[in-house]
Image (cartoon, rainbow, N blue to C red):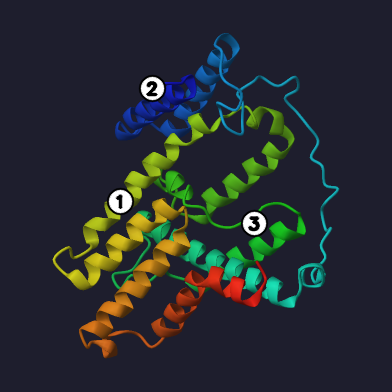
Amino acid sequence: METWPTVVFGLTLLLMIVLYVRRVPGGILISIVAGTVVAVIIEANATIAEGGWGVVTPNMPDDLFAVPDFSLFGQVDVFGGFAEAGVITALVVLFTLVLSGFFDAMGTILGVSDEAGLVTERGDVPRLGRILSVDGVSAAFGGLTSSSANTVFVESAAGVGEGARTGLANIATGALFAVTLFLTPLAAVVPAQAAAPALVVVGALMMMQVAKIDWDDLELVIPAFLTIVLMPFTFSITIGIGGGMVAYALIKIAKGKVREVSVWLWPVVALFLLFFAIHPIETWLGVR
């Protein structure tokens, strides 16, 4: 507890834990609002080093409303990247983005669906194809609007924890985001220290799923462990999934159980090996 932003994070997290375990409706949102209020008060009365809050400094805005800037909407050059960077470089970047985007989405969808109790006994997510189609179209639409990709985020588990189980919750969230477009100055007051505690709670919810792993089976334990630890250490869901899959395939080969592995896993493992070797490949191709 060396800085005020750290204090805000700690207090917000403690409040969120108390409200969540007591099943207070909207406990996560209440904690974020309370943490933001405390952060605004501290920023107004204490001396905080420049950049101490990170990207967002909790200052009250001069205006609460703002008209969104749609000037970049539709400003898309589909093949401009190929002309500017070269075909090989563009293809390497495209491969990396598609692979990481797909498996980031897959990992999030499985995790959130499992938390919501929507995964079958076989580990399948009902109507997964439709979910991925919507995610892909949304991500492409994000590019059309010149914004970040509109893809699934593990933060959705916070909504699931509050009771969300149907698409109605998603529609309500989308509508609130649309309103927030005109309340950007107010939304920009919330510092990461007030919002990040929700991810800690989400992490706890996700960790509850590891109880379903057979911890006596090394063939599962090692891939599961690598998947779990690589995600936070590398800040990438994709790398975690890839490390687990490669380890799983290697163990099956080492134990002579290749036939137990689905035929569809091998191309995925090959893609991940290519993904992990992307930097030396870029150097070899001269596209770095």
Q: Is residue 45 left or right of residue 239?
A: right
Q: Which quarter of the figure has residue 96?
A: bottom right
> In this orientation, does residue 133 appear?
no
x then y, percent, for residue 204: 32, 44
Q: CA distance from mark 3 to mark 2?
A: 35 Å
Helix, strand or loop at disc 2? loop
Numbered badge on residue 149:
3
Residue for badge 2? 1
Q: What is the crowding at mark 1: few (fewer than 14 residues within 10 Å), some, or many (at least 20)?
A: few
Q: Residue at x 28, y 51 (%)?
A: 208
Q: Residue at x 34, y 47 (%)?
A: 205
Q: Earlier in the sequence, mark 1 or mark 2?
A: 2
Q: Is residue 221 left or right of residue 81?
A: left
Numbered badge on residue 182:
none
Q: Earlier in the sequence, mark 3 or mark 2?
A: 2
Q: Earlier in the sequence, mark 1 or mark 3?
A: 3
Task: Name which residue type carries label 3.
Answer: Ala
Say if 204 sits above or below 118 in the image: above
- Name the one closer to the observer, 230 or 178: 230
Q: CA distance from mark 1 to mark 3?
A: 26 Å
x then y, percent, for residue 248: 30, 75
Helix, strand or loop at disc 3? loop
Task: Name which residue type carries label 2.
Answer: Met
Q: Residue furthest top?
A: 45
Task: Name which residue type carries label 1.
Answer: Met
Say if 47 sits above or below 132 in the image: above
> In this orientation, does residue 248 appear?
yes
Helix, strand or loop at disc 1? helix
- Name the one closer to the observer, 97 or 14: 97
Residue for badge 1? 207
Say if 197 sits above or below 172 in the image: above
